[in-house]
Structures are given as structure tokens and as C-alpha cells.
Image (spheres, rainbow, N blue to C red):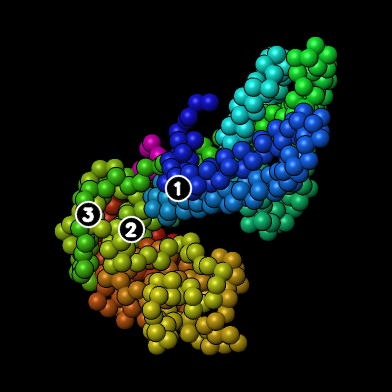
Amino acid sequence: MKVDKANYAVVKLIKRKLRYLIIGGGLTLIAIGFNLAVPWVMKIIVDQAIPHQNWSLLLYSLFGLILLPIIATLFDNWGGLHNHKIGGFVTDQLRKGIFYKLLHLPPKIYHNFKTGDIAARIYSCGEIGDLYITQCLIPGIFNSLIFISILVIMFIMSWKLSVTVMILLPAMYYLSTKYLQKSRKLAEEVMDLQTDLNNYSQEFVSGLKTVQTFTQEENEFNYQSNWIDSYRKVRNRTFVIYSFSDLLIEGQRSIGLGILFAFGAYQIFNSEMTVGALIAFTVYFPQLFGALEKIQFAIAKTFEYRPKLKLITEIIELEERNDLPSVAISDCSGSIEFQNVTFSYNEGRGEVSDLNFEIKSGEFLGIVGPSGGGKSTILDLIMRFYDPNKGQIFLDGKDLKTISLHDLRNHISLVSQDTFMWNRSIRENLMYAKRDATEEELIRVCKQAQLYDFIEQLPEGFNTVIGERGIKISGGEKQRLAIARSLLRNPKVLLMDEPTSALDARTEALLQKNLQSIFEGKTAVVVAHRLATVRDADRIIVIENGQVHEMGNHRELMENQSVYYRLFNEQYKTS
Ligand SMILES: Nc1ncnc2c1ncn2[C@@H]1O[C@H](COP(=O)(O)OP(=O)(O)OP(=O)(O)O)[C@@H](O)[C@H]1O
């Protein structure tokens, strides 16, 4: 079997636990030895102890017959424990590998994966380690040893009968592997369909409200039904293939045993073989077939798990950021500069181009402009979720790429449009930003974000659990919670993307009043559609089609009578 990149990753992991493999292997080999001795003892009883009425030999042999399988099982399980540890280790390492990689990948890469797809890959790690390695791969290797050992013993007992077995085996093996190839293809199909189901299930639950809003229940149900039907058909076909190979193996075994008895009897008639040897052969033969079955099973499972393993290693081997050597920054004043910055998500899509502007330390900068112009992209570039295709961004005169990512994000905090909250308590969600925050700090930031009154009314207060993605609190409360969480970090640079879009007019006005104190000593960059949010900003940048269209404070921009003036009048009229 070709060792491809995916298998190589597992081989590398197994190598790290070589001592388990050696100890487990040693113990299993001892178990194999004890097991293989059993038919030989039978031969001694039939050929020597019974004909010569040798009672002491019979007694010792009987002891052997009873004890050998028990001791073999003991060693087998002991060895199995070590193999199990290897499987567990591989599972853990693969899972940790995926989690670590996802935590460190830039969004440009992980946005290409679907949630269900990733969940399926994380689940598959357990199958690879616990099922594949412990129950297929390692037993497959040991059964190859058993297979060879039995053949050697058989040759010692009767080479003629062994040659008969050797002729039978390849023909049987060829037939079975033909079916295994078919099952490999089906396994890949089942895997693809399973991934689709995972993705769909995740989307389905999140989209239930939308389905009901647009009365699409029937269409969605039909879509699911078609999917479930095709999945069942593939599963059925897999079952038929597997059942047929079972039938094939059973048939082969029976025919083989019949031929063995016929030749064995013939050899006994010609005094070329003893009855004891034939009895031993009849015990070894099923063992030989059992070993072959397990080898076949291991090969079949290798085909089944290879695509899963490939999907896992595909994530683990993804390139992380190709950063320049970074420097730590313990303190920063918070000045930011964009120099000839051009960036696009995909070829020519979602572009911001040739951005040149400076944000002074302590300045309150507003960013406004039509939807899709590139405002959020600017914030993401400052956070280094993306890097410019051309040009540079500086923090305190240092290129962002040269600053340690950890330090950069310690000094800069982002309240994004799509705030994510864990299904945990308000306290835990807040303390996500600062693990050692005191009660006083929590209260202070919640007051600043106009959230404290709301928390005080809750029976559980800070300990209220807010549901998945914060579903149990309103959009506006979630937004204020996100602001409070960011403030807890006391960042030098505060980036806010539509921080008041979900607030009612009164709460917005209250928060607005607090902005001066919130922004004190910080550089603040606020993206807003509602121009009132940034009206008091020191400077406002108007972004249109990915470019800086105009810049100035509210009064200057109004005098300009350009895009800002138009937007302001549109809002003024509508309100
Ligand atoms: N992850 C992404 N992949 C590809 N294109 C993207 C991605 N995110 C945004 N875009 C595109 O980039 C452009 C700028 O998006 P951005 O979110 O920066 O605009 P915006 O000015 O903040 O818009 P809005 O005011 O509606 O939030 C848009 O055309 C958008 O479709």
C-alpha cells in the first residue's frame, strides 16, 4: 500500500509512542506463541499420549490445553492496553492539531470551510485513533505475523497439505479483494454524503426561522427527504457489498476445509501423515483464515479511513501566517498609519485600494460611507485578520507584520458587527476579555456600556446564561455586552463596527453621552451608518468603492457638500 501524506502523518504520530508499540507488540507476540501451541499440544495427545497410554504426558498436555489459551488471552489483553494507548494518543493529537490550526489560521483560509465539515473532521479523529489504529491497523500487522507463523508450522507438519492450502489461498484472496475495491469507492461516497448532512444540519437549525418566515417547510422537507433517500441507497449498496464479501469468505472457508480433510485423509491412508497432525491442521486452518480475514478487514478499513484521514491532515498541514520575525510591544501610544494599502478578498472582489491616512494617538476617527464600500475591511486589516496585498499599515511607526500578533491584539480591541457570544453566563462572556477582572471592573464597564441597569433587573444578574450565540438576550443588549467586553481589556486602540445599530434612540443617546469618557486616552475608530454616532469625531473619513473619498470633521464635510453631505441629508430627511 502506498504511504501517502495522510498515512505518513499517522505513522509519525505512532513513532512518537514507539515504546507502547514495542511493549504492546512484545506482549501480543507472546500471546500469539501461546495460542499457536494449542493445536500442537492436541497433536501430542492424539499421536503420542493416547496410543502409548502415557498418562503423565496426557496430564501435562491437558494442563497445557487448559492453561495456554488463558495465558494467551491475558497477554493479548495486556498488549491490547498498550495498543489502545497509541490509538488514544493519535486521536488526541489529531484533534488538538485541528483545534490548534483553526485557532491560528487567518480568516481568509478558515472561511473556506463549512462548520459541519469541520465538526465531521473533528469527529473522525476518534474513528482514526480508536477504531482504525486500535482495532484494524495494529491487529492487521499482528495477524500478518500469525498468518506467517501458522504457515511455517503447517509446513513443518505436512508440506504437501500446506502446498494445497497455499494454492487455495491466493485464489480466495483475489476474489475477496475485488469486492474490497468496490467497498472503498462506496466508503468515499458515504463519507461525502455524511459531510453534506453535517453541514446541512447545522445550517438547518440556524435557518429554521427563515424557513418558517418564507413558508418553505415543504420544500425544505422534500430537499431533506431526497438527501436521506440517496444516503440510504448508498448505505444499502455498501451493506450488500459487505454481506457479499462475508458470504464469499464463509464459502471459501467451507470449501477449503472440505479439500483439507479429503487430502489429509488420503495422506493418512498412505501413512504420510498422522491423525494428530490432521486434527492440528483443522484447528490451524480456521486460525489461518481468521488471520486472513483480519488482514483483509484492516485493508478494507484502511480504504475507508484514508479519505477521512486525508481531510484531517488537510487542515493540520495548512500553512499558517508567513510572518516576518515579530517583536513584542509592551506599550503603545495608538497611532495608526495606512500607506498605499490595497487589498482584495478574492481576485478583484471586495477591494480597497491605495488607502493613505493617519490616525493620531488619542484621536476619535469616524468611518462612514455607502454599504459594501470597505469600511469593515479597514478594521479587519488593522486587526490583521487580513494582510494588505500592497502597501503597509503601521502602529506607532512599526509595520503591523513585525509586531507579535498576540501583543497587537492585546492593544487593539474590536467590537464587530457580528458579535459572537458563548452559551455561558454574562460574567463568563465578559471575563473572556480579561480572566482576572474584578467585580468592580465588571460593573464599571457595564455602566459605561449602558448595560448595568439591564443586568441588575435579571434574577441571576451577572450569572444569567445568555444562550447559544446570545440568543436569550436582545440584539441591542448583545451589542452593549460586546462593548463592555471590549472595554474590560482597556485597549489602547478601540475599533467599533456599527456599535449602536441595534440600540433604541434613548439608549443610543445615553451611550453617545458616555463615548467621551469611554474613548478617553484611547484611539477610537468607529464605523457607522448612523452619522449621529460619529458626528462628534475629531475626523471622519468617507469611504466609497474602497477608496477615501473625503476626509474632515463634521462641519468641514458638510461644507464640502459631497458624499457625506448627501448621506447626512438623506438621514436627516428620513428621520
Ligand atoms: N470574507 C469576504 N470574502 C469576500 N468578499 C468579502 C468578504 N467580506 C466582505 N467582502 C466584500 O468586500 C466588500 C467590502 O465589504 P465591507 O464589509 O468592508 O463593506 P462595508 O463598507 O463595511 O459594508 P457595510 O456598511 O454594508 O457593512 C464588499 O463588496 C463585500 O461583499
Secondary structure under tag 2 reads: loop
Which residue is depicted at the point 28% across and 67% down? Answer: 411
Q: Residue furthest top?
A: 270
Mark 3 element type: loop
Question: Does residue 318 belong to the magenta stretch?
Answer: no
Q: What residue type is labelled 1?
A: Arg
For this rendering, which residue is in front, 19 or 244? Answer: 19
Q: Residues within 10 Å of mark 2 (few under 14, many from 20)?
A: some
Q: Which region is colored magenta? A: 344-349
Q: Earlier in the sequence, mark 3 or mark 2?
A: 3
- Please give the count of numbered marks on the rendered protein: 3
Q: Is residue 44 left or right of residue 438?
A: right
> Is residue 38 visible from the viewing direction of this image?
yes
Name the residue at 57% across, 80% down. Answer: 464
- Asked if the beta carbon under badge 2 is closer than 8 A to the nearest atom of ligand 1, the reply is no
**Would you say 225 lies left or right of 315 here?**
right
Residue that mark 3 sits on: 326
Give the label on residue 19, or none: 1
Q: Which of marks 1 and 2 is in front?
A: 1
